[in-house]
């Protein structure tokens, strides 16, 4: 076989949720650009794009094709042929929808190199404008980096996850949860389900495809959570007694704090039993390489967490004039020295794309030296972007006590990591992983036999 002939090892498969707009679409564009710039001319990339309906999926592919067509020919020899797209439909607040997509992809794809868990829902119903003015006058940069004035729809849960008891699908299913016309379906927090649990189930279900990656490329499959810089506002508010954030006024921030905890503790001995369970989906299907040689092996995927900084998106709906003012304030914060205001979503995609494409050996070396980190998209005053480690309450920049303190980009009142705080964070990770795995297994039992 000639070196220039395509193999599964030269085909890069990445799934991005919420790919039709905002950061998700920008991540797709940046993935294409950096892949074509850095990989060999015979390497190709397949973007598996998830949206909530087929119209959005088709529109996303059309816009991405136009993006590729506009690239300079010198930067994309045969670029059009090297990029392919697969649009899929999923509603992350519907566990049956997640289950259907998982089953479909397991039969269609040979492997997945990366899953980028981007889709998000804020769950906000407005802004406390008086509080926003007070916070802006107290500390302008903090008010547009770690705002505390967004109003959440407290207590909001998803619609019923199970079909009606008397439906054809329900009659076919036999479950221990059915009893005298009733069945046990505990509520799921809407923000939690979309931002965390739907993604969690999807990643677990697709773990065989992630494990298939190693035999072809020597790399490990990667799960990349898209978090937020705003998680530092809920360090004290986060509680494992309300891991879904249902009764909290900070459901979005708590969901992102949870993704931080899950990712940063995923390689610790304390969480290993639950992480191994999470990553141990069905055995991978053995598929021969394109030359007929070799079989797909099993390799434990890695879990990372990134954030885009502060970007201008529509996740918090406001009047258009307020949207313009918001963007101006973001730029002012950047000019005042904030490293967390890329503003533009393409710049915000810097960190997740870097983690997706970075050689495994380089990532392993960096984290062996400085610990597991939360990788953020950062810019200087002139908008030049770079990837930067981000401080996480209870973990610091890498979970290493005594690490060098980086003063830029810290929330007011942040404390240096202590051994006690580090141990508490590890315990928090253990409890979060335990609860998430229990919740997953409970819902898999409820969904068993349903389509």
Image (tube, rainbow, N blue to C red):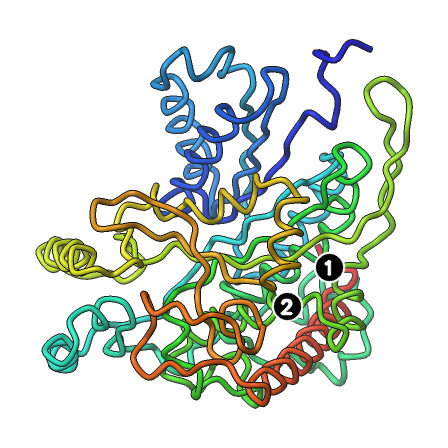
Classify 383 as above or below 150. Answer: above
Mark number displayed over residue 87: none
Which quadrant would residue 185 be assigned to in this image?
Answer: bottom right
Residue 424 drawn at (x, y percent)? 60, 87
Q: Residue at x 66, y 55 (%)?
A: 203
Q: Nearer the viewer, residue 358 or 14?
A: 358
Label 1 CA crowd tier, 10 Å (few <14, some 14–19, many 20+): some
Query: Upstream in the sequence, badge 2 or badge 1?
Result: 2
Do the numbered discs 2 and 1 sit on residues whose CB atoms are within 8 Å? yes
- Image quadrant containing the C terminus: bottom right
- Image quadrant containing the N terminus: top right
Q: How many marks?
A: 2
Query: From the viewer's perspective, is 102 left or right of 391?
Result: right
Residue 169 drawn at (x, y percent)? 71, 60
Which quadrant would residue 71 be assigned to in this image?
Answer: top left
Classify 247 as above or below 259. Answer: below
Q: Which residue is the site of mark 1?
A: 450
Q: Residue at x 47, y 31 (%)?
A: 34
Residue 5 drawn at (x, y percent)? 73, 12
Q: Which residue is the site of mark 2?
A: 162
Q: Residue at x 9, y 78 (%)?
A: 137
Which quadrant would residue 67 be assigned to in this image?
Answer: top left
Classify 372 as above or below 451. Answer: below
Q: Nearer the viewer, residue 400 or 265?
A: 400
Q: Secondary structure at mark 1?
A: loop
Label 2 CA crowd tier, 10 Å (few <14, some 14–19, many 20+): some
Query: From the viewer's perspective, is 334 left or right of 307?
Result: left
Q: Residue at x 52, y 72 (%)?
A: 403
């Amino acid at each position: 076989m000639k070196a220039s002939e395509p193999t599964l090892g030269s085909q890069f498969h990445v799934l991005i949720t919420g790919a039709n707009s905002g950061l998700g679409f920008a991540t797709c564009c940046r993935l294409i650009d950096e892949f074509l710039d850095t990989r060999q001319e015979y390497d190709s990339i397949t973007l598996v794009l998830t949206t909530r309906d087929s119209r959005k999926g088709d529109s996303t592919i059309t816009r991405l094709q136009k993006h590729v067509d506009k690239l300079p020919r010198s930067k994309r020899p045969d670029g059009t042929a090297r990029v392919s797209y697969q649009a899929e439909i999923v509603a992350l607040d519907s566990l049956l929808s997640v289950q259907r997509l998982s089953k479909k992809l397991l039969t269609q794809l040979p492997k997945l190199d990366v899953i980028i868990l981007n889709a998000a829902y804020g769950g906000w119903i407005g802004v406390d404008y008086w509080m926003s003015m007070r916070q802006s006058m107290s500390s302008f940069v903090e008010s547009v980096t770690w705002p505390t004035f967004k109003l959440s729809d407290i207590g909001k849960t998803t619609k019923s996850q199970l079909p009606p008891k008397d439906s054809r699908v329900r009659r076919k299913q036999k479950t221990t949860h059915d009893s005298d016309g009733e069945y046990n379906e505990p509520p799921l927090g809407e923000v939690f389900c979309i931002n965390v649990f739907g993604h969690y189930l999807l990643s677990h279900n697709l773990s065989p495809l992630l494990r298939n990656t190693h035999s072809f490329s020597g790399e490990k499959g990667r799960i990349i959570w898209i978090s937020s810089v705003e998680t530092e506002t809920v360090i004290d508010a986060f509680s494992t007694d309300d891991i879904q954030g249902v009764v909290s006024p900070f459901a979005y921030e708590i969901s992102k704090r949870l993704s931080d905890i899950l990712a940063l503790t995923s390689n610790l001995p304390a969480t290993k039993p639950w992480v191994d369970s999470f990553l141990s989906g069905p055995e991978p299907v053995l598929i021969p390489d394109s030359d007929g040689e070799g079989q797909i092996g099993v390799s434990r995927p890695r879990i990372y967490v990134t954030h885009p900084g502060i970007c201008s998106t529509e996740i918090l709906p406001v009047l258009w004039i307020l949207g313009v003012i918001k963007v101006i304030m973001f730029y002012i914060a950047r000019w005042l020295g904030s490293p967390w205001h890329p503003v533009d979503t393409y710049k915000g995609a810097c960190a997740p794309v870097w983690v997706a494409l970075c050689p495994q050996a380089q990532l392993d070396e960096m984290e062996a030296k400085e610990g597991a980190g939360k990788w953020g998209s950062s810019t200087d005053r002139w908008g030049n972007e770079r990837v930067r480690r981000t401080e996480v309450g209870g973990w610091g920049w890498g979970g290493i006590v005594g690490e060098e303190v980086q003063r830029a980009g810290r929330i007011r009142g942040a404390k240096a990591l202590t051994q006690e705080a580090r141990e508490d964070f590890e315990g928090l990770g253990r409890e979060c992983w335990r609860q998430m795995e229990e919740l997953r297994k409970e819902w898999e039992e409820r969904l068993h036999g349903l389509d």
